[in-house]
């Protein structure tokens, strides 16, 4: 799913196989540079050199550094959406919801800890309007999936209320992860556990 046409710095979507392969190489090189020195230090000229293309060719696909970063952010989000949808698809009762959502929190936290590029990108979310919009859209998509699972557990619940609280739960989850990776590991672990306890209590309250 390409959000490039709806955000600032929209990039050219490649149609041919060779062009798609070039885009993949560009993104892989950008990820390597971000992992090595952070997105702030990454330069378009460095990406072009590592990818073995001219700076002009790079700009044909990505008009600026922000377009590269947003594309990477969208890809991380899409992978997360698949993980969440898969994790919640079989939920049918409160016990299953508790287990599945608790496991998803642990999985997502592990991804943040293991992926330096993901950590770098999302640490700058609040400073980038386009990233904030991507973040909100991601929370809405995942919140809808969570609301659907909660509705299966409690078919009598008010669906609008479920969707609102599920959207909030997902957005607070993103904020918790960013906070957790910005502090010492032991404190970060405790923050994630507290988030898990709070949201499970909210979702499973009678």
Image (cartoon, helix red, strand yellow):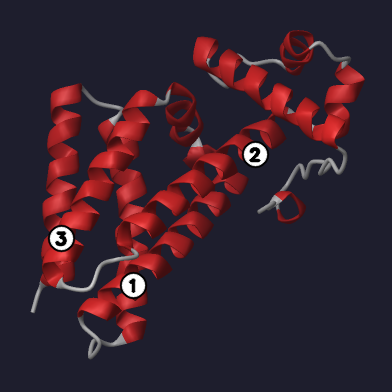
In the image, taking residue 60 as reference, residue 97 lies left or right, namely: left
For the residues labelled 1 and 3, the Cα–Cα distance comes to 14 Å
Q: Which is more N-terminal, label 2 or label 1? A: 2
**Element under disc 1:** helix
Image depth: mark 1 or mark 3 in front: 3
**Element under disc 2:** helix
Q: Which label is found at residue 52?
A: none
In the image, taking residue 49 as reference, residue 144 lies left or right, namely: left
Along the line of sight, which residue is nearer the eye, 94 or 161?
94
In the image, taking residue 164 as reference, residue 70 lies left or right, namely: right
Report whether residue 40 is seen: no
Q: Position of residue 195 (x, y in %)?
A: 18, 49
Q: Which residue is mark 3?
A: 98
For the residues labelled 1 and 2, the Cα–Cα distance comes to 27 Å
Residue drawn at point x = 43 percent, y = 22 percent = 116
Q: Which residue is mark 1?
A: 147
- CB-based contact (under 8 Å), mark 2 and mark 3: no
Q: Is residue 172 above or below residue 176?
A: below
């Amino acid at each position: 799913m390409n959000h490039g046409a709806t955000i600032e710095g929209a990039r050219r979507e490649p149609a041919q196989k060779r062009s798609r392969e070039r885009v993949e190489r560009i993104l892989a090189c950008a990820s390597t540079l971000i992992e090595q020195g952070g997105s702030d230090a990454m330069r378009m000229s460095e990406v072009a050199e590592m990818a073995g293309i001219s700076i002009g060719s790079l700009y044909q696909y990505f008009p600026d550094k922000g377009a590269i970063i947003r594309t990477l952010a969208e890809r991380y989000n899409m992978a997360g959406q698949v993980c969440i949808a898969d994790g919640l698809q079989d939920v049918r009762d409160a016990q299953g919801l508790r287990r599945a959502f608790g496991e998803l929190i642990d999985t997502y936290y592990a991804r943040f800890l293991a992926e330096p590029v993901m950590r770098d990108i999302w640490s700058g979310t609040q400073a980038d309007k386009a990233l904030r919009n991507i973040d909100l859209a991601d929370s809405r998509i995942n919140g809808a999936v969570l609301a659907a699972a909660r509705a299966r557990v409690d078919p009598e619940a008010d669906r609008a209320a479920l969707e609102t609280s599920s959207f909030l739960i997902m957005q607070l989850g993103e904020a918790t992860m960013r906070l957790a990776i910005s502090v010492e590991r032991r404190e970060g672990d405790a923050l994630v556990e507290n988030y898990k306890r709070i949201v499970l209590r909210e979702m499973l309250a009678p």
